[in-house]
Each structure stands twice: as C-alpha cells, then as structure tokens.
Image (spheres, coloured by chain):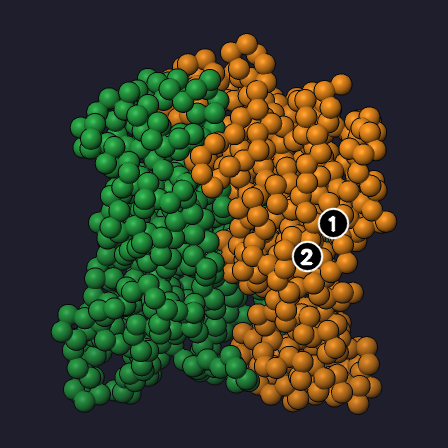
Chain colours: A orange, B green
Amino acid sequence: MTTLPSPALLTDRYELTMLQAALRDGTAGRRCVFEVFTRRLPPGRRYGVVAGTGRVLEELTRFRFGTPELDWLADERVVDDATLTYLADYRFGGSVVGYAEGEAFFPHSPVLVVEGTFAEAVLLETMVLSVLNYDSAVASAASRMTSAAVDRPCLEMGSRRAHEWAGVAAARAAVVAGFAGTSNLEAGRRYDIATIGTAAHAFTLLHDDEASAFASQVDALGAGTTLLVDTYDVKEGVARALAAAGPGLGAVRLDSGDLAVLAHEVRAQLDAAGAHSVKITVTSDLDEHAIAALAVAPVDSYGVGTSVVTGSGAPTCGMVYKLVAREDADGVLQPVAKASTAKTSVGGRKSAARRVVGGRDAEEVLVTGPDERVRAASSSADAAREAFDALEQAERGPGELRPLHVPLVVDGQVDERWTGPQGVRAAAERHRTSRATLPRGARRLSADEAALPTVTLTLPRS
Amino acid sequence: MTTLPSPALLTDRYELTMLQAALRDGTAGRRCVFEVFTRRLPPGRRYGVVAGTGRVLEELTRFRFGTPELDWLADERVVDDATLTYLADYRFGGSVVGYAEGEAFFPHSPVLVVEGTFAEAVLLETMVLSVLNYDSAVASAASRMTSAAVDRPCLEMGSRRAHEWAGVAAARAAVVAGFAGTSNLEAGRRYDIATIGTAAHAFTLLHDDEASAFASQVDALGAGTTLLVDTYDVKEGVARALAAAGPGLGAVRLDSGDLAVLAHEVRAQLDAAGAHSVKITVTSDLDEHAIAALAVAPVDSYGVGTSVVTGSGAPTCGMVYKLVAREDADGVLQPVAKASTAKTSVGGRKSAARRVVGGRDAEEVLVTGPDERVRAASSSADAAREAFDALEQAERGPGELRPLHVPLVVDGQVDERWTGPQGVRAAAERHRTSRATLPRGARRLSADEAALPTVTLTLPRS
C-alpha cells in the first residue's frame, strides 16, 4: 500500500501561531476538551451521517512534522525555535471518543470529543474538520440515495467530479452509507471496496461501429459484462448487445435520455428476446430524487456520480471544533464558551445518548454535568448505562438511553478496529442499524426539520 | 518537498477495462483526440475560470503504475496480464494543448485537448477531470469574490470545510483567481503562496481572561498581529486589544454578528483612540454577495472559508472528457460524436479564440475545420493568427481573434512553466488580464446568461 504523506501541514497557520504563544506563556500544557459538532443540518435535511472517523484515526497516526516540514516552517519564520522543537517531537498522547462511524447525528451532537493538552489538541483542528466535514457530507447525501433505492444497489461513480483524493474518501463514505461499490480503484485498494465499471462511450466511438465495440468488450471481459447501449440508437444498441453476448449478457447501461421511459422499453425488448436475466443499470446525473422517481421503473441498479461526491447540495457539514473546557491556573477543568452574538455554544464536556421509545428513536440527548461523570459516561457503554441508571426515573425520561460515544483513541493509542477496511465494514453495519430506528418519516426526501429534537440531560454531582 | 503518491489508481475502473479490450482487439494504438469542455455554466454564472491545469501537468509526470499498484490490479483480476505489462511501462507520450490556466471559459470552450493513442489518453480521463472540475469550480467562485472585493484583499481560510488535500488545491485555485493568501500551510509550501492566520477563539478561551490572551499573543507574535476581538464583548475586546498592543496593532478580526454595523462601530472606536492605522478584517461565512454588501463598510480585508472551497453553490464544473476524433482502420483521423439524445457533442478537433472588438470580448469562437489546420492553430499563437489571417474578412468577422490554446505537453514533455509556484503566478496574471476584457456587466453577481455567446468558425480546406 502506498502511504500518503503526513497531513501535518494540511493545517491552518493559526494553529501553529497559537501554539507558539501558548508555549511561551505556559498555557500550552493546560488540559483541554475540544468538541466537534454542527449547529444545524443543511436546509431541509432530517439527519446527518457521521463519516470519516476511521480516516481521522488513520491521519492521526501519520500526523508528524518531519525534517522537510520543519525546515519549511523555519525558513518561512512561521513559528519560533521553541515551537519547532515541540513540533519535531509531536505525537498526540491524548484521548478521543466519538460517535461510531455510520451513526446518525443531529444539531449539536458531540460527534467527536478530543482531550489532551492545548498544544496537542489544537494542532488537530484543521485535519479533523476537513475529514469529518467532507466525508460526513457525502455519507449524509448517500444515505438518502440508498434509502430511495430501497433494495437496489447504488454504485458510486463520481471521482471525476471531486478533487482526485476526495474521490477516494467519497467512495469510502458512500459505502459507509450503504453504497454497494465504487468505480474508484484506489478506494477499492485502500478499503477493500468492490470496484465496478466496464466501458464508456469513448470505447464504442473508438471502434468502426457499435457491433465491433461490443464484440471486443465481450471477448475481453466475458458475456457477463455490462454494455453501454446509448451511444447511437438505444433499441439498435440493445439488439446488438444481445447479438454480441447472447442471453448470458450481464447488463445494459443507459446514460442519457428519459431513463424511466427507456428502462421500460429496454426491459420489454430484453424480455421479448427471452433475455430475462439481463439487468438494466442507469447512470446520468442521478440524485436521491431521481432515484426515487425511478422506483417503479424496471431498473436493477443506480450509478451515482456528481450528486453523491458533492453532498447533493450540501458539500460540507459545517462542523466546528470548539474548546468547551480547559484547566485553569489551579489545574481545575473549567467549562468555557464564546459569549458574543449568534455563534453561542454550550460550554463543558458532553456525552450523548439516543433515547429510544418503543423501538424508535425519540430524542438526541446531550449529557452534561460534572466533568468526571460525563467523561465516564463516554468511556464505555457499561459506564454510560450505569450513569443513566443512577438518575431518578423522572429525570431520566421514558424509554431506553442508547449511549453514543465509543472510545477511539486512549492515551494516544488508536483503536484500529475503526480504521482500514474493517473500519469501513463496521461503519456500514452501524449505519444500517442506526438508520433502522430513526422515526417514521425521517427518511422522507422532502424538506423538513431535524427528525429528532436535541435535548439535554444533566447528571447529578454524586 | 514531500512528493504525493502516484495518482494512477485515482482512476475509474472502466478506463482499465476499456484499455484491456482495446489492447486485445488492436484499437489501443489508434491515435485519438479527447477534448475537455463543459456543456453549460452553473445556473446564473456568467463565466468560468480555468484552474488546475498546472496540477494536471504535475500529476501527469507522476502518473505511473508501480509494483504495489500492479500487484493489486493482478490480485483483484481487474485486468489481464497483457494489460499489466502495458501499464508497467506506461508513460504518456502524447501532446496536450489547452487554455492557459486562469483564462475565462464558456459553454463548450475546449479548455484541454489531449492527443495520443487511445491507450495512453484514455487512462488520464479521471485524473484530468477530477483536477479541472474541482479547481475550476473554486476559481470560478473565487473570481466573483475578488471582483466584489475590488481592491480589498481576499484571504482563503476554507481548508476545514473541504477534504484535506482538496484544501490545498482550493487555496491554489483561489490565488489563481485573485486571492492574496491562504491559511493553508501546505499550499504555502507547495506553491509559494503567502500564508496568514494568528489566533482563534480557542486561544482566548484557553486563557483566564481576554486581556491575558491578547498580551500573550502580542508577546509572541508582535504588536503587528491581528487580534480576534469578538469572543466576549466586541467593544471591550477592541479596547483590550489596543491596551495590549498599542496603536501599532496590525488589525482586529470580527468573526460574528452584523459585520457591517460592527465594522462601522469598531472603526469609530479605533479612530477615536487615534488608532487610524489599525485594520479591520472580517470573516464569518462570507460569500461574494456578503462581500459586495460590505463594500461601503470600513473593512480592510475579507477572510473567506466555506463558500470558496465549495464553489459557492457550484462545487464542481461538470467538465467532461470526450473522444472527438480517432484514427480509422486506414490510419485516417475521423471525427466522432455520441449521437443519441440530450448529450450530443460536436465531433472533430477544435481550437479556440476570443473575439475582441473595441478592447472588449465579444464572442467565444470554436475553430473547426480540417484536422491538420485546426491542430496547427492550437500549436502556437503565431500559427493561429496565420490560420485566421488566411480567412476572408467576411468569414473572419469583426475585431481581433485572440488565440486561446497554448501548448502544455509536447510528445510527452511537460512545459514546466505552467507547474509549481511559477505556474500559479502565471495563472494569476492570466486571470487578471483575461477578466479585464470581459464584457461590461459580465462581473455582475446577479444571475444571468453566459457573458459571451459561443460561435463556430470553420477554417477552409486550404
């Protein structure tokens, strides 16, 4: 596997200048809690999907300032020598808890909580947000598409409409949200995702006629291949496809025109020829609404490009990385929050739970209270349940509280179950189970409010 | 400089399966011309800005299938042994012409033309489109922002709202379109772009009070720093900033609230304190419309994040990579085009020129005709003018025809003037000159049609 370079300089300059000032004034070592959350969902969206957590952990293990990075920072006088010395030895030694990748999220859900010294935690802000904001935007859109597609597979084909490395992350995030595969080879290699794709119009146009293009493709890739039948005339294309591959043809692909009408015509043509097993796959600027509109058409799978890699109208999540608590001069952890207009945040560490009543999600519960109790509630599901059980029933509310935080990094050690291919599989499984208990109607595509209200439950002091 | 890994697998699987079939049937060696263009601008946009050309050339020089890539393709049986042998030796040996990076483009502008064997050219499709689609989307949005800002600097700060490597490309593309700097350190290192940034709210909150945070920052970064004054109360923040740094303070930053009102209040407060040289920089979800609305506010610079890295509503360009001509069995280059519904393209190689009448752009001219004449017109500005001069005046039309294609790769050799830092500088310069001659009104932000009509001029056979 080719390793990507360190993400250390994929960082806003101010993280380093803040570090320099804090090292100089002695606050760099103060223990801090940073929380990642979004203030709102994109307009009309009912839920979001956490994605990228595994990639954050992968990037974290490679987050190092090597000699070339340090030399450049020195040459450009970005920071002083004391800061360079700190950076040369930088290893994140703190802890991270968060929502399991694939979990649904809502406004103010604390999807990631980073705890460490100011110095070690502040440096991660840009990387953490870049990964979570992009990957979650893609997964949140992708989940609506796989919802609309019901049991038909969705295939990610949007690499060409995103930055070249974003395409890899997009394929991964789409699979977290239920996509069955991707056209992107690097995503296949890196995350053991099924890759798909056979031929474009260029292949047909390269040949002297459609029949010779189809014959060549079948010869090279077998009769089970997918033939693209809309380069010239679709009806003739389907006839030539059957002539080239016989009834064992895998599928035909339609990439233009009125797909619903064409799918019916092509299905009828295939069936009339006895080619009942030949599938129909459609592509062509599909989004969740187009997929829903094709529900009654005889389509077997959907290839989705632009709309999934650009978050279908919401290309980023607006997640922020906010300092919510830090040690004071006496070593006591104090809640903090920006106090001025508009962007007010709630201070203090938060854990989280989903209230489930009658098998359906009812509320997103932010868990606040004394820092050590909240911290414990984020450390394991058992500790969380214990903390919740200690509450009086009246405070606790109805139904069950499903704890949402899982440990991701403990004292600098990344839990590798969330990384690599196994992380993607775990996240896809989590997304299936998480989405299954959303309230009825949460998966409607029409614009509406967040599907769950976000409420706060406060743990008592003892 | 840390080198990125090869982009060879940042590729749709079908490029490789098409290659396999074409190698097997003997068409892989047919000379082909692929053209990159967009069918339309995003709704309401009047022009687009070509960006990413330099990055395409940088990626092209690293586009190699190494042992890890070949082993994975073999293990996964993506392609057969003959194809693996071809890929092991892959070097692009063809030629590329295109619009100079930074140039304006319109519907159907042939912004890049790739010529080579089918095999060598088809493999580049995904990479070329990923880079151009993302970078041009950012530059197209950024150009509207720098237009709206007139002489005030725009600073790119959106890394956290884009995929971590997309953030680097976004910073670069923003600078092509007139931004003065970026917060992204890697973009600074890789493209010699000015980096900016001093402190976030977290830095103030880390400290026991705002005064000690400001004192620390001034101690570490000097009085010329920018202090963020809206963590608590803006008026008190400004007073504390002046107390900490004195009248030599560089700037104050406002990141929330009604920026126009606050800017007036803060300017008055600074001036009343005799701090006339202290600048005001504003950030907080700015886009081109917000920047335009702040034109009459006493603001000195704009920090732009989300909207620039997501293309301000148009996060990708919709550019396609289409086969427009290929050799037939007799070795004669034949124009080709998809013939079915909706997505019809014009076949044959195209060159391009901008018609300039009275110092203003009047038309985007696609130049078609006999392949060798069109090819010559794309090979140099002199050859293009010679070809245009050969036309009768009636065919040629009014004004001057400014040739738009420049050679980028000749027989596999990349022209390095378009790459690295010098490429970014050249592109930014090209954008300034290109934008300066757009028709009056083309830079209006309100929704309208493309600012230039796209017309076709056909060179005669001799």
Q: Residues within 10 Å of mark 2 (few under 14, many from 20)?
A: many
Query: Quadrant location of residue B155?
Result: top left
Image point (82%, 81%), residue name: A276
Q: Is residue A83 above or below residue B281?
A: above
Tell me the kind of residue under disc 1.
His
Q: Nearer the viewer, residue A364 or B154?
A: A364
Q: Are marks 1 and 2 in contact (CB under 8 Å)?
A: yes
Tell me the kind of residue under disc 2.
Ser
Residue at the right extreme of this rendering: A358
Q: Are marks 1 and 2 on the same chain?
A: yes
Q: What residue is shown with label 1?
A: A431
Q: Nearer the viewer, residue B402 or A260?
A: A260
Query: Quadrant location of residue A389?
Result: top right
Relative to residue A112, is residue B287 drawn left or right?
left
Q: Is residue A267 above or below residue A168?
A: below
Callout 1: SS: helix
For residue A7, say whether it is visible.
no
Q: What residue is shown with label 2?
A: A143
